[in-house]
Image (tube, rainbow, N blue to C red):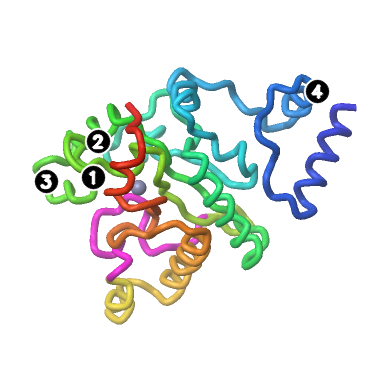
Amino acid sequence: MLRYLFIILIFALMTGCTRAPQATPAATEAPVVADTASQVPADSPTEAALRAFGLVDIQEVDTSIRVHLMYATPDNFTGEVLYDDLHKAFLLPEMADKVAKAQQLLDERKPGYHLIIYDAARPLRIQRRMWDKVKGTPNSRYVSNPDRGRGLHNYGAAVDISILDEQDKPLDMGTPVDFFGPEAHVTLEDTLMAAGRLTEQQVANRRLLRRVMCGAGLRTIPNEWWHFNLMSGNRARQMLKIID
Ligand SMILES: [Zn+2]
């Protein structure tokens, strides 16, 4: 019976409703979720704190969006695990809705492709550890100073994101995510393509990402092809609360 309900749920999702129902305390729905092959783990203390802060888990808004948080593994520019107990991508509800909209736009252009989130809400205490790794180096311009401007990740209003193809393989964007160097700069793409440092396909892949993200109402930044903001930094500092 539960399996039957799950099949109905999957069928409903495939026939045009890309948004999964919000997590609900309704007892009748809980067993359907529990019967799925990919069970959603319970919130860790950090995840529970982010939820209590008012943020939402993107995979509860759109189950088709993939999540692989780079700071939850040592495979990031610091070489260390910074997210000890954070594996879910939490965002402000308005931001999560826009990312889900971007997935819908991607579905229309490239059926079978999925957005993949590499970073979302980032508590300020983790921003401090990250800043300590780069301060005093040329790479400090790629990381927000937690004592000054603060980045929109610290408000749940930014994502680091890319695209997986039908085989779940990341599209070639010319650089990895969190690459420190001119090849990551959105504003230099034409120059780098002319110089043979980025291929036409790599730039086309980045344009696809920008088309769906900006089409959903999100904003790009000049020096990181993978990073998108909900609003300007000034507006965030006036309107939003910092996560610590
Ligand atoms: Zn970012």
Task: Measure how far apart labels 1 and 2 are at the Cα level.
Answer: 8 Å
Q: Give the numbered dot on residue 28.
A: 4
Q: Nearer the viewer, residue 29 or 76?
A: 29
Q: Which residue is mark 2?
A: 130
Disc number lying in front (3 or 4): 4
Task: Measure how far apart labels 3 and 2 are at the Cα level.
Answer: 12 Å
Label 1–label 2 contact, CB within 8 A: yes
Label 3–label 4 contact, CB within 8 A: no
> Quick check: 178 above or below 60?
below
In the structure shown, which secondary structural element does the residue marked by tag 3 occupy? loop
In the structure shown, which secondary structural element does the residue marked by tag 4 occupy? loop
Per the rendered image, the range of residues in magenta is: 170-187
**Cβ(mark 2) to ligand 1 < 8 Å?**
no
Mark 1 is on which residue type? Answer: Val
Magenta run includes residue 146 = no
Q: Which residue is mark 1?
A: 143
Q: Nearer the viewer, residue 180 or 94?
A: 94
85 relative position to 5: left or right: left
Mark 3 or mark 2: whose residue is earlier in sequence: 2
Mark 3 or mark 4: whose residue is earlier in sequence: 4
Q: Report x, y in % for residue 80.
A: 30, 32
Q: Give the numbered dot on residue 158.
A: none
Q: Residue furthest left?
A: 136
Disc number lying in front (2 or 4): 4
Task: Measure how far apart labels 2 and 4 are at the Cα level.
Answer: 43 Å
Overall secondary structure of the magenta stretch?
loop
In the structure shown, which secondary structural element does the residue marked by tag 1 occupy? loop
Q: Which residue is mark 3?
A: 137
Mark 2 is on which residue type? Answer: Met
Task: Measure how far apart labels 3 and 4 are at the Cα level.
Answer: 55 Å
